[in-house]
Image (tube, helix red, strand yellow):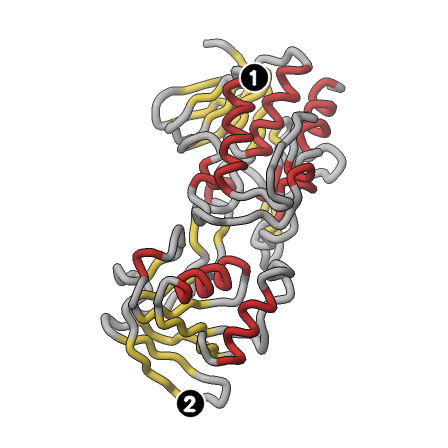
Amino acid sequence: MEILDILIIGAGPIGINCALEAKKNNLNYLIIEKGTIVNSLYNYPLYMKFFSTADKLEIAEIPFISAAPKPGRQEALEYYQGIARQKNINIHLYEKVLKVSKNGKIFEIETSKSNYTAKNVIISTGFYDIPNLIKIPGEDLPKVKHYYTEPYPYAKQKIVVIGSSNSSVDAALETYRKGAEVTMVIRNSEISNNVKYWVKPDIENRITEGAIKAHFNSEIIEIKEKTVIFKDKEGKIQEIENDFVLAMTGYLPDFDFLKNSGIDLQGECLNPVYNAQTMETNIENLYLAGVVCGGKDTHLWFIENSRIHAEMIVKNILSK
């Protein structure tokens, strides 16, 4: 069996960047991706706009041309998938990595379709696969959605949006503007300061005028077929009619996969252990790249501040 120099798990922007860096240095590499190219971006809301400008999303010094100051989902898909095509990146799609184990100095990688061996492995799997469940009765009902794509299915429906993050605010505003009756249930006392600066005044104004209802310092305690029950800021139990719940409570890395690969996870946030100078984990020649490095703190890493990981990793590999 061929022994790869590098096997990369995940074909997101950072995984692709790692492949480009490996290719530039004549290393034999392969990306294994369980979905399509930049699968997480593909599953983002259809009309999502990035916080970052196009230049901050560029990889491998390849220009990202955008007509708007803040590019959207479709432009990003065109950019990253276009790079994969033009650079003829070696990727196996719709193939899930099941297990990574080390036999001496060689990694053995088992997937849903085959087996591989490699001298080095880079895990760049992001965090968009596993919803951060609130673990309340009724969360598994069909009307509860942990992923939001577009507002049209929710026209003239009674919607409860959980949370006050960017995804929560986008879902609330978009569904409201398509005719939904929107109620937000928010643990905190105000809309998050992390919400996009051009969107935050919009949601706050809609709440102030009463177009969107918002219950701050409140907590959902049960979801029923036709209602939602929550505790308000005064500790009173309220029950309201409801057709759909958009539980925008965030997402988590696959911690079981990291742990089963031998990576140590530390603290309440399950931060994976790695060398910040080389991105090498506690397992020699096993590296992390991108947002997966942050554990539960998924806001710490994003494309513009983790695109440097590829060069750091390949430099370390070449130094050995």
Q: Quadrant of the N terminus?
A: top left
- Where disc 1 sits, the SS reads loop
Q: Earlier in the sequence, mark 1 or mark 2?
A: 1
Residue hosting label 1: 87
Residue 242: x %, y % from top left: 29, 73
Does 50 sit above or below residue 192?
A: above
Q: Which residue occupies the foreground of this view, 54 or 251?
A: 54
Q: Is residue 100 left or right of residue 221?
A: right
Amino acid under disc 1: Lys
Residue 143: x %, y % from top left: 28, 62
Looking at the image, can residue 266 be seen?
A: yes
Residue 106 or residue 218, whichever sits in front: 218
Q: Residue at x 60, y 37 (%)?
A: 66
Q: Quadrant of residue 56?
A: top right
Task: Identify the image quadrant of the C terminus.
Answer: top right
Asked which quadrant contains residue 62, the reply is top right
Secondary element at tag 2:
loop
Residue 166 location, x and y as percent? 54, 59
For mark 2, what is the residue?
236
Count residues near mark 2 (Cα–Cα under 10 Å), then give few for <14, some for 14-19, many for 20+: few
| Image point (52%, 25%), residue name | 82
